[in-house]
Image (tube, grey):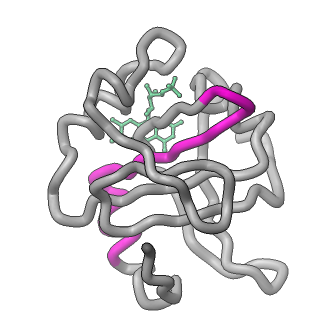
């Protein structure tokens, strides 16, 4: 059970945590992967709250997100999951199952088909509405 909160109330915490890393999780058909992100921005465009993630083309995540309709961002705000953030930011899902290696469990999200990472404090459930080459 999640508590829905307004993005304005948590934007500061979100950006603060991005500096230390967050999990961007993506699902395409039967494949799920997560990677650490630190680049991101929150805003308001087209009368919608927007989270812009920047994913390099070389990432396995990029391959999946190209075919996906949503992604999630899971933020551990209390300093937990540091080793997992480091692992998921240096190893590719092409070579390893990061969930298995890091002991990460997935939980269903509420509004999108992509799961979130258990044990985090703040989750963004993002519907993909626009993509741009970086
Ligand atoms: C702290 C940290 C932040 C990172 N932020 C980003 C990011 O915002 N965008 C990106 O493309 N890669 C970022 N990376 C690199 C990816 O997480 C890394 O290349 C990862 O292994 C990609 O996994 P994948 O191939 O399974 O998608 C970051 C790495 C670390 C350690």
* Image quadrant where residue 31 sits: top right
Q: Considering the image in quadrants, where does the N terminus appear? A: bottom left
Q: Is residue 85 above or below residue 75?
A: above
Report the residue at 49% width, 56% height from top. Answer: 73
Report the residue at 70% width, 26% height from top. Answer: 63
* Image quadrant where residue 66 sits: top right
123 displayed left or right of 13: right
Q: Considering the image in quadrants, where does the C terminus appear? A: top right
Residue 115 part of the magenta-drawn span: no
Q: Is residue 83 above or below residue 53?
A: above
* Image quadrant where residue 57 sits: top right
Report the residue at 38% width, 25% height from top. Answer: 98
Residue 16 part of the magenta-drawn span: yes
**Residue, far front:** 1
73 displayed left or right of 70: left
In the image, which residues are magenta?
A: 13-31
- Depth check: give the residue in front, 127 or 130: 127
Q: Is residue 50 above or below residue 120?
A: below
**Residue, far top:** 95
Where is residue 89 shown, x and y percent of the image?
Answer: 37, 32
Where is residue 62 shown, x and y percent of the image?
Answer: 66, 31
Where is residue 65 shown, x and y percent of the image?
Answer: 70, 38
The quadrant of the rendered image in which ligand 1 is seen is top left
- Depth check: give the residue in front, 35 or 5: 5
Report the residue at 46% width, 19% height from top. Answer: 92
Where is residue 49 shown, x and y percent of the image?
Answer: 67, 79
């Amino acid at each position: 059970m999640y508590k829905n909160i307004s993005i304005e109330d948590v934007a500061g915490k979100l950006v603060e945590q991005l500096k230390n890393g967050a999990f961007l999780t993506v699902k395409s058909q039967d494949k799920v992967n997560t990677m650490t992100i630190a680049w991101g921005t929150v805003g308001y465009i087209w009368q919608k709250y927007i989270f812009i993630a920047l994913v390099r083309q070389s990432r396995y995540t990029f391959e999946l997100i190209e075919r996906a309709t949503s992604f999630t961002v899971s933020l551990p705000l209390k300093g937990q999951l540091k080793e997992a953030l480091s692992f998921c930011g240096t190893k590719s899902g092409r070579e390893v199952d990061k969930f298995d290696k890091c002991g990460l469990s997935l939980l269903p999200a509420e509004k999108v088909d992509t799961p979130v990472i258990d044990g985090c404090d703040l989750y963004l459930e993002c519907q993909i509405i626009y993509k741009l080459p970086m």
